[in-house]
Amino acid sequence: MPADIQKPRVGISRCLLGDPVRYDGQSKANTIVLKQLSEIFELVPVCPEVEAGLPVPRPPVQLTGSIQNPKLTGRDDPAVDVTGIMQQYCHTKPAELEQLSGFIFKSRSPSCGLNSTPVFINGECVTEHSRGIFARAICASYPELVVIEDTELEDTSTLNRFISAVLNT
Ligand code: SF4
């Protein structure tokens, strides 16, 4: 793509870019993102947990209590409850992202997972196909946004559909 043509802006869960922002201080660098999609899109990194004010490292959290309206509580210490802090962040952040043509989410995350996040009720996993709190807020704010999660990038036809859909917005 010529340098003077503006690339579509696509949001991305920041850990997929290789930034060490995960709860354990690690990243989830994604080769397809770094080698292929970064050439086509202007990637806009977002780590909702860090931007909401949580530290790195931090206690791991999970969705709990309800599939429809879950809390975000500690995986190892249920007394940890960061639901309020994340809800507050999700109330304001989506408005800053109105220029985006797409979003690439990190799978299984209680904040970023798109269709792959587990929910636990009374210690039992009741679904493995729910949506993280931040991904939910973005999809509610922008129902037409072209979205995908990292695990889907591995399927070439799904990847190509995502690229085409973003380029055609
Ligand atoms: S999955 Fe989302 S909240 Fe978790 S480290 Fe990555 S960007 Fe941050």
Image (cartoon, grey):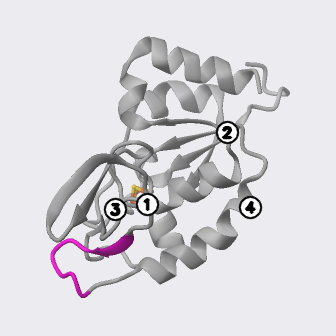
Q: Is residue 116 above or below residue 62?
A: above
User: Please, what is the three-letter code of the amino acid marked with disc 4?
Assistant: Glu
Q: Is residue 100 above or below residue 134?
A: above
- Residue 22 % position (x, y): 34, 62
Q: Nearer the viewer, residue 68 or 42?
A: 68
Reading the image, the residue beneath label 4 is 96
Pick whichever of labels 1 and 2 is earlier in the sequence.
1
Q: Nearer the viewer, mark 4 or mark 3?
A: 4
Which picture quadrant has residue 77? Answer: bottom left
Say whether residue 79 is left or right of residue 81: left
Which picture quadrant has residue 122? Answer: bottom left
Reading the image, the residue beneath label 1 is 68
Reading the image, the residue beneath label 3 is 22
Q: Nearer the viewer, mark 1 or mark 3?
A: 1
**Is label 3 in a helix, a strand or a loop?**
loop
Reading the image, the residue beneath label 2 is 145
Region rendered in magenta? 71-79
Say whether residue 145 is left or right of residue 136: right
Pick whichever of labels 2 and 4 is earlier in the sequence.
4
Decide: marks 1, 3 in contact (CB < 8 A)? no
Q: Which mark is residue 118?
A: none
Pick whichever of labels 1 and 3 is earlier in the sequence.
3
Which picture quadrant has residue 51? Answer: bottom right
**Is label 2 in a helix, a strand or a loop?**
loop
